Amino acid sequence: MPKTIACLIVVLVLGGGIVWAAGLELEVDCARQAGRIRPLHGLNDGPVNFGETVDLTAYYRQLDVPLVRLHDCEWPAGDLVDMHAVFPDPAADPTLGESYCFARTDDYLQAIVATGAGIVYRLGESIEMTRRKYYVHPPEDVSAWSQACLGIIRHYNEGWSDGFQYGIRYWEIWNEPENRPNMWSGTNQQYYRLYATAARTIKAAFPDLRVGGPSVGATGELVDGKLIPTDFVTGFLDVCRSGDVPLDFFSWHTYSGDPYVFRLKARALRALLDSYGFTKTELHLNEWNYLPDDDWTPMGPAGQGARRRQWYDRMGGAAGAAFVVCTLIDLQDSPVDVANYYRGDSNPFGLFDRHATPKKTFYAMKAFRMLLDCPQRLVTVMNRPGQPAVCAGMNPEANEAIVLIGYFDGADQQIRLHIRNFPRLAGTAWQLYRLDGRYDLEQVRSGRLDDGAALDETIQAPGVLLWRLRAGQ
């Protein structure tokens, strides 16, 4: 008889900076299920970038990226995906294939599809940080612009004009129109008109597609768990409700120094949408990342030099890695339907440096991807409830599971992990992996468990631990 090996992997994330004298007692009960773990590790932008001198396809496949959103592709070049690049002459006939320049965008999308990822196509323009704004202006002819959107959809979903049949489901109308003048030089009303016209046009031609926006960065202020929305957001929702404008998904962005704010905002936005009657509208957090010290200054000219380098180093380093794991696990208890980290490629915000070397944030994504091999979420119990974000999972065959631990901020923490009701616990082999300033999700220790034994470890902030357990006979 061949030997049967059962495998358990557990993933736990800690945050909050509190030290407990008795340590953290964590129990994972493999006999109690708590729903499904959701693949919320989508990214912005594709694997081939930097003038096609960087190809991250193999890494994207390792992560099994669910959805790639197209925005700021090859930024700051902006010569693909954006409307001015694909449909360069606004006065051209949008029903003719020769009015479009698809080639560069074709190549970019083909690379994404080759990884197995789906696509969220942002219709509009990339951000312009330049003093002169070139393309982030309201279209002069909104109807013609909307017809050009149909041409793009037909090309990528119906094979029109030597195109493809990718079945791209999500189509987003513009990006951060409240971010002025870098993303929109017009008024609120001009954007509302653009959105309403384009959304109606797309849904009339392709009723099964999902159309959404407004891809807003400034959603409003959280007060006691309730969102006080900006005038832009309330105006947008008023237009959609009063005009019966399609809103299949509401997209929004947040960058923060707090990995637990995304869940709070998501719940508040869900309540806001529901109050407007948009109970079936999906919630897309399609830009998010760690913002060190909640400070954007290092990105501008005043922050260039060593300060900017250190800022990006923190974003992609151990702190950023712990932030990623904490966020992805905390989002499991949120109403977010789709999430896209900004970003996946070798842009300074991305998971890789300009030389295509993985940053620590890539390994954080990889740790979360390991968790998804065991998608049946398990009940966890702690002696200090409310402090760590914890997730544990087991596979459908009940012979494999995962527990991951990440610690974003605080003093050293003693952890004692108890595994309950795992098949054939006696003789279980375990491996411990670390992701921190020294290790890149590397195995550092291993051993075996007896019945009733616990696993003890110290975690330092910022850092991540991952235990893998394989049951004996």
Image (spheres, helix red, strand yellow):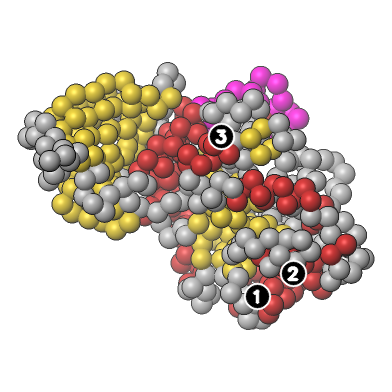
Q: Is residue 5 left or right of residue 109?
A: left
- Name the quadrant containing residue 149: bottom right
Foreground pick, 238 / 460:
460
Vertical relation: 93 (above or below) 75:
below
Q: Is residue 260 above or below residue 462?
A: below
> Does residue 315 show up magenta in the picture?
yes
Q: Position of residue 256 (x, y in %)?
A: 53, 42
In the figure, is residue 371 to the left or right of 365? left
* Residue 302 appears left or right of 446: right
| Secondary structure type for disc 1 | loop
Q: Type of residue at label 2?
A: Leu
User: Of the numbered discs in the image, which one, if any, rests on residue 44?
Assistant: none
* Crowding near the residue tagged with mark 3, few <14, some 14–19, many ≥20 C-alpha atoms within 10 Å: many
In the picture of the structure, the residue carrying the numbered disc 3 is 351
- The total of numbered circles placed on residues is 3
Residue name at image x 89 percent, y 69 percent: 93
**Which amino acid type is shown beneath numbered disc 3?**
Leu
Question: Quarter of the image holding residue 387?
Answer: top left
Residue at 15 percent across and 27 percent down: it is: 448
Q: Looking at the rendering, which quadrant does residue 244 occupy?
A: bottom right
In depth, the one of 458 and 470 nearer the eye is 470
Q: Is residue 471 magenta?
A: no
Q: CA distance from mark 1 to mark 2?
A: 9 Å
Contact? badges 1 and 2 (CB < 8 Å): yes
The amino acid beneath tag 1 is Phe
Q: Main secondary structure of the magenta part?
A: helix
Q: Which residues are magenta?
A: 299-317
Residue nearest the viewer, comparing 93 with 298: 93
